[in-house]
Image (tube, rainbow, N blue to C red):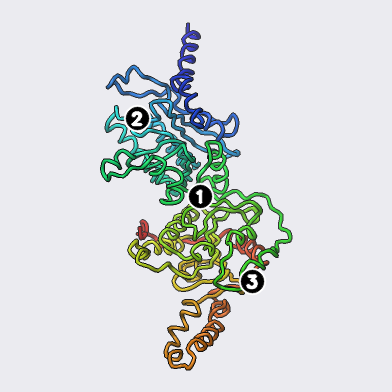
Amino acid sequence: MLEKNLNKLQDKKLKALLGGGESRIAKQHQKGKLTARERVHFLMDEGSFEEIGMLVTHRTTDFGMEKQIFLGDGVVTGYGTVDGRLIYVFAQDFTVFGGSLSETHAEKICKIMDLAMQNGAPVIGLNDSGGARIQEGVRSLGGYADIFLRNTLASGVVPQISAIMGPCAGGAVYSPAITDFILMVQDTSYMFVTGPNVVKTVTNEEVSSEELGGASAHSTKSGVTHVTAANDMDCINKIKQLISYMPQNCEEKTKRLPYEIGEEYREQLSDIIPDSSNQPYEMKEVIEGIVDEASFFEIHPDYAENIVVGFARLAGRSIGIVANQPMNMAGVLDVNSSKKAARFVRFCDCFNIPLLVLVDVPGFLPGTDQEWNAIITNGAKLLYAFSEATVPRITLITRKAYGGAYDVMNSKHIGADMNFAWPSAEIAVMGAKGASEIIFRKEIKEAANPEEKLKEKEAEYADKFAHPYRAAARGFIDEVILPKDSRRKLIKAFAMLENKVAKLPKKKHGNMPL
C-alpha cells in the first residue's frame, strides 16, 4: 500500500513538474524559450543539481485557488555546481500561474539566498514572472520585500546575477536592480515598473513592451542591462562566462588559471597611437594587446560607449578593466560613463578583483545638458568609487590625461598603486591650444600675426607640459614605458601587488554621492 501511494505521489509530482501540462511547455518552446527546468539543466554541471522545495504548494484558498495546486508553486530552487563551483539558483516557471510570485514562491527564493550567504556562494536568478500573484494581495507584496532585503544584505557578500528570460514588471524589477549584473534575452524579455497600458493611461504615449523595456532599450538607453543575449542558451552560456571571472564570495579571490610566463612583448601596441593627438584610435585594440588572448568580456558594450569596462585575464589572473574610448566622443567623461564605470569599480572592489585603468581622457563633457543632469554628482561617483577601492589598482596613461578627469581616472593622488605612461602621454590641466589662448592671451592679441603667435605659444606649452616626464619627475608617474612593454610590466606589477592589504578608516559606511 505504501509503495502504491508513493507511486501515485510520483505521478502527481511529475505532472506538477511539467507546469500543469505538456501543452504549456510546447507554447513556451514555440516562443523560442526554454522551460525553467531546461534552463537549470543547461546552466548546471550534468547531474549536479539538487532541488529544494519541490513539494511546496501555495496556501491561498480565495478565488478558487484551492482547486489549482502545482507542486513547487512556480519556481524551481536548489543548488549545484557550475564548472565545479557551488552555485545556488532559482528559476521561475512561467507555465505555472505565469510565474507569479506568491508567499511560498518568495519563501523558496529567500531560503536559497539565505543558504548562499551562509555558505559563501553566488546566487543566480532566472527571472520569468508576470509579477505579484494578485489573488494573495499583500502577502505577495511582502514576499517581494523579503527578497529585496536579502538582495541588499547579500550585496558585496556573494555575487548575484539576474537573467531576465521573460517578463519582469512592477515591483519585481527591483530585485534584479539590486543584484550585481543583469542579463536580458532579445525579443523575449522585458523589464519596466509600469507597463504600456499604464503609460498610455497616464501620459497618453503609445509604446510597446519591447520599446518600453526590452533588451535593446535597457542595453542602450537606460543602462539597466549589462549584457544582452540572442536566446536562452546564449544567455546561459554568458552567465557561465561572466561568473568565471568572480570568486565565490568577498573573502576569496578568483581562481587563477594556469599560465606560463613567456615572451610578453606586444609589438602591435607600438603603432596604435596616431601621430595627431586629435585623431581617434580603438582602445579595445590596446586592451586586446595587453590581456590574455580572447579573455576580454565586455560589460555594458552598448551603453555610454565613451568608456569601456569589462573583465579579462592577465597571465591567468582575473582583472577588471576601465578604459576611456577615444573612438566615441573622444573618450570624455559624462554623466552616463561616470555612472557605468563607478558601478563596475565598486563591484570589482567588493570581490577582490584587481583594476587596470587605461586613460585617454580630454576632460569632462561640457554643456547645459550635462550640468543640469548633475555631471558634478555623477562624476563624483567615479571619483568616490576609485578613492574607496582597496584592491590592487594600476593606471596606464596612453595619451591625454587632462584636468579633473586626470585626477578621477585612478590617479596616484587618489590611491592608485602603480601609474605608468606611454611616451605619447599628455598630462596637463588642459590641451596646449586652450591653455595657450588663456596664458598668452595678451601676447597673442598684441602680435603682428596672432595666428602665428598662437602656434608658437602652443608649441612652447606643449614642449613644457604635453608629455609625461614632468609628472614622472614628481613621482606621480612611476615609469614611462614603451607600448610594446606594457603587458610585461603590468603582469609583474599585478604579481607584486597580489597580497596588498589596505584598510579604510573605521566607520559604519561612507555617504557616496548617489
Q: Amino acid at mark 1?
A: Glu
At mark 3, the secondary structure is loop
In the image, which is nearer the foreground, mark 3 or mark 1? 3
Question: Which residue is found at the position 68% from the left and 50% from the top?
Answer: 258
Q: Residues within 10 Å of mark 2 (few under 14, many from 20)?
A: many
| Callouts 3 and 1 close, C-beta under 8 Å | no
Q: CA distance from mark 3 to mark 1?
A: 34 Å
183 or 212: nearer the viewer:
212
At mark 1, the secondary structure is loop
Q: Is residue 232 above or below residue 307?
A: above
Residue 305's mark?
none
Q: Amino acid at mark 2?
A: Ser
> What residue is pinned by disc 2?
102
Q: CA distance from mark 2 to mark 1?
A: 34 Å
Mark 2 and mark 1 lie on one chain; the one further toward the N terminus is 2
At mark 2, the secondary structure is loop
61 or 277: nearer the viewer:
277
Q: Is residue 230 left or right of residue 189?
A: right
Question: Which residue is found at the position 28% from the left and 44% from the top?
Answer: 204
| x then y, percent, for residue 325 | 53, 62
> What residue is pinned by disc 3?
481
Residue 251's mark?
1
Mark 3 and mark 2 lie on one chain; the one further toward the N terminus is 2
Q: Amino acid at mark 3?
A: Ile
Q: Residue furthest top?
A: 1
Q: Is residue 207 above or below residue 38?
A: below
Q: Residues within 10 Å of mark 3 (few under 14, many from 20)?
A: some
